[in-house]
Image: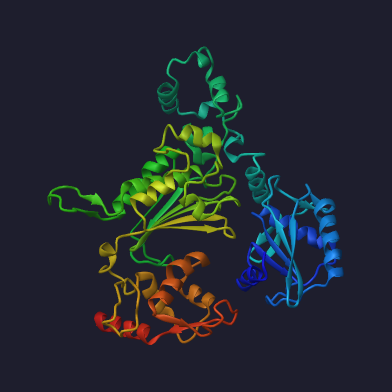
Amino acid sequence: MTQSDLQKAITRGEDSRHQFKRDATNADSLAAELAAFANSGGGWLFLGVNDDGSIAGLDGAAVRRLNQLLGNAASQHVRPPVHPLTENVQTNQGLVVVVEVPDGLAKPYLDNQGRIWVKQGSDKRHVTSREEMQRMFQRSGLVYADVVPVAGSSIEDIDDKAFTAYFDLRYGESDEFSGLTREQLLQNLGLGDGQELNLSGLMLFSRNPQRWRPAFEVKAVAFPGTALHDTRYLDSEDIKGTLLEQFRGAFAFIKRNLHHVQHGRSFNTVGQLEIPETALEELLVNALIHRDYFTSASVRLMVFADRVEIVSPGHLSDSLSPEDIRQGKTIRRNPTLTEHASHILPYRGMGSGIPRALQAWPRIDLVNDSSGNQFSVVVWRPEAEWRSGSGGDQVTGEVTGEVTGEVTGEVTGEVMRLLVVLQGEMKRSEIQAALGLKHEDHFREAYLRPALKAGAIEMTIPDKPNSRLQKYRLTAAGKAWLHRRSDNKE
């Protein structure tokens, strides 16, 4: 790493993958930092850098002491040991020790007191909940939620008709299973232990899965506007049953709350759904199959005037990012459930679901919320279908030089809503809160950056874009567009 590379990394500030420390003197404290990185996808620790990003620098003696401390902390104070890589970078202020901690392959990593640490933003936190510990063991391949026995269930809870139809379709007259009892069949297929059903058997073939797992359903709501906090709704339904029944019910809910368009067809035809059905099918199936079943929460389906949101319990695995799954990378969170569901639901596996959905309908945002332990897909509806609908905030359009001569990009519905709430000079967090948005990455990608690119807003400290004092304000072009919008409403 060159000094220039180091400066670029530091300029971006601290986050879940980058931590600054002026110095380190305690092996236990350092071990906690190393364990948190190893448990959370890996990262870089910069020693010799102040919290504000300024380089303090280290002398040769300090570097030797720190390397010895690092080796001791990594091998003696973290269980199992971690194996960080270090690099000493020379700067004008002195040396900076760059410590790279790889994503751990043997999670969870514990400190000497047996505590599990994970990253939370630029800080770390102690894991205490059983569910989160279970998820960490799951990511390490030590335990999977889909094969955990469901206490109190039995073979009597199986829907014989549904199971027989599946078995005959997939296995037919296979000699492998001839002569086996129903209990033995379920055990051999990984759907139970011979006495109780496991979660896969319950969610795929039981008559009433919610009797034991009431949270494992789809909660669906259709809103008239674009805000989640709207107290009005057009439609709502709690969709229960097996995964196949939930898929069918959720898909029917979406279809009845979206528009159908003719696309040149005869007036008497039903018309095509405004968003391709293929994309919606893939996203629904992914939400049901790949959700975190260690988390007692429901899949949420929300239809807004401008978008459809599908929210799954469980964020992406530490080694996956939204960009990874856009490219087709995948990790099976529920391998047994996935194996059987692929013959029941329209699921093709191999990580192809998200790429296929994006190919059918590119206007899809993927939002990974690690702190909230959820993963969301935001499917934007065609603007022509909602632009003229009810609700004063549903305004979109393209702003060109005809407004003020200063706006250079597209002002989308998201940007328009940002302009409406921006009062005077506001911080990023203040604007995000005013919009009622929880996910910073989504806010930056869909709202803030497009508004800056369009020339509708500007930074108060443009020469220091990452300053903690940074605020944003309307430009003359942004004000003109708001004024024009107001005139159009009157």
Q: Quadrant of the rendered structure where residue 475 is?
A: bottom left
Q: Answer above or below: position of 10 versus 125.
A: below
Residue lying at 26% horizontally and 80% vertically, measured from the top left: 489
Rendered location of residue 480, percent (x, y): 33, 85
Residue lying at 63% horizontally and 45% vertically, measured from the top left: 139
Q: Answer above or below: position of 100 versus 59.
A: above
Rendered location of residue 446, percent (x, y): 43, 67
Q: Answer above or below: position of 302 versus 410.
A: above
Which scheme is used to colour this image of the protein? Answer: rainbow
- The tally of labels here is 0
Q: Out of 33 and 286, give the one closest to the viewer.
A: 33
Do we see residue 117 in this rendering? no
Residue lying at 61% horizontally and 39% vertically, measured from the top left: 144
Q: Out of 254 and 424, give the one closest to the viewer.
A: 424
Q: Quadrant of the N terminus?
A: bottom right
Q: Quadrant of the C terminus?
A: bottom left
Left or right: where does residue 197 sit relative to residue 394?
Answer: right
Q: Out of 328 and 340, give the one closest to the viewer.
A: 328
Rendered location of residue 11, percent (x, y): 62, 73
Do we see residue 330 in this rendering? yes
Rendered location of residue 445, percent (x, y): 46, 67
Q: Out of 246 and 329, give the one closest to the viewer.
A: 329
